[in-house]
């Protein structure tokens, strides 16, 4: 679960106290911690867990996403699992501006897992050059080989068994490609917001962070939209 030797897929998660998935910084569309305090009407974030869809911090998340979401990103306009996976792996520790042209070029060259698995490793690595952490590319090619032979797993456990796939990427695939309910893909930034806003603490176990994120999903938002709106 470490395609870049501990740098690309996992970094220490000071919020959950575990090896949370390392992904690029994102602008979280939830209220800020100070807004949480104001919304809760107290000097400290509330520790209560409201019913599904009742959170004041996510009540207008759908409208915020419609107006401020990053809808122009091409990988947000597809549900094709291979295209989603390539974007998720490329975006680990790499800026969006660098990934945009390379994602398109990679998929033009290898539009499906079978094509990538059949390519010589040195060609895949040369195509990856400039994105950093080439072991991610090697792991992606190995993953492509498994998928080309056995198909896509349909649950988080199966996805995490693929080469180079961690909890974050598996959950992203579940929600973004397969439209299946899953705990949201949680990076360190999102975990920090969940801990401060909903649990009233600086740190919390990973399970509590996931539970908070699941509980505060607006009832009107699909899992895919909720996941995209959080980043």
Image (cartoon, helix red, strand yellow):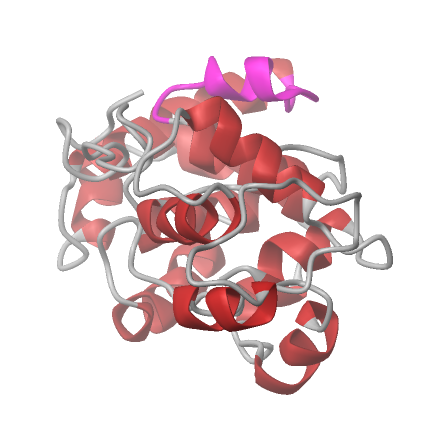
Picture quadrant of residue 218 = bottom right
Q: How many marks?
A: 0
In the image, is 126 to the left or to the right of 25?
Answer: left
- Is residue 223 toward the left or the right of residue 8 in the image? right
Which residue occupies the foreground of this view, 146 or 28? 28
Image quadrant assignment for residue 171: top right
- Image height of 36 relative to 10, above or below: below
Compared across the picture, whether 173 is left or right of 110 comes to: right
Query: What x and y, as percent, mark residue 90?
Result: 33, 51
Residue beneath the point at 36% across and 30% down? 141
Q: Residue furthest front?
A: 42
Residue found 35% across the figure and 49% down from its top: 192
- Residue 41: give x, y in percent of width and height: 57, 67
Nearer-the-camera pick, 36 or 182: 36
Q: Which residue is depicted at the point 26% across and 66% down?
A: 95
Q: Is residue 114 visible?
A: no
Q: Position of residue 188 (x, y in %)?
A: 32, 45
| Vertical arrangement, residue 115 with respect to residue 225, above or below | above
In this view of the protein, can residue 158 be seen by the observer? yes
Q: Is residue 158 left or right of residue 93?
A: right
Give the residue drawn at x 19%, y 32%: 12
Magenta-colored span: 151-164
Question: Vertically, is 168 above or below 154?
Answer: below
State the residue in front, 181 or 139. Answer: 181
Residue 140 sits in quarter:
top left
The N terminus, quarter of image: top left
| Residue 4: percent from left, percent from top | 17, 32
Residue situated in front as seen by the camera: 27 or 109? 27
Q: Taken as a whole, is the magenta stretch helix, strand or loop?
A: loop
Q: Is residue 62 magenta?
A: no
- Tell whether position 161 is magenta: yes
């Amino acid at each position: 679960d470490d395609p870049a030797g501990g740098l690309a897929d996992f970094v220490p998660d000071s919020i959950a106290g575990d090896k949370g998935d390392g992904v690029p910084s994102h602008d979280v569309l939830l209220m800020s911690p100070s807004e949480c305090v104001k919304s809760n009407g107290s000097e400290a974030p509330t520790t209560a867990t409201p019913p599904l869809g009742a959170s004041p911090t996510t009540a207008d998340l759908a409208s915020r996403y419609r107006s401020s979401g990053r809808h122009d990103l091409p990988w947000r306009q597809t549900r094709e699992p291979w295209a989603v996976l390539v974007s998720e792996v490329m975006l680990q520790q790499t800026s969006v501006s660098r990934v945009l042209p390379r994602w398109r070029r990679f998929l033009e060259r290898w539009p499906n897992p079978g094509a990538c698995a059949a390519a010589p490793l040195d060609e895949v690595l040369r195509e990856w050059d400039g994105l950093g952490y080439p072991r991610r590319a090697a792991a992606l090619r190995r993953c492509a080989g498994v998928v080309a032979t056995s198909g896509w797993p349909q649950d988080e456990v199966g996805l995490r068994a693929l080469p180079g796939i961690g909890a974050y990427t598996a959950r992203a695939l579940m929600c973004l490609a397969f439209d299946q309910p899953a705990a949201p893909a949680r990076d360190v930034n999102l975990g920090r917001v969940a801990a401060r806003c909903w649990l009233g603490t600086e740190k919390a176990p990973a399970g509590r962070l996931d539970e908070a994120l699941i509980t505060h999903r607006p009832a009107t938002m699909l899992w895919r939209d909720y996941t995209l709106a959080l980043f």
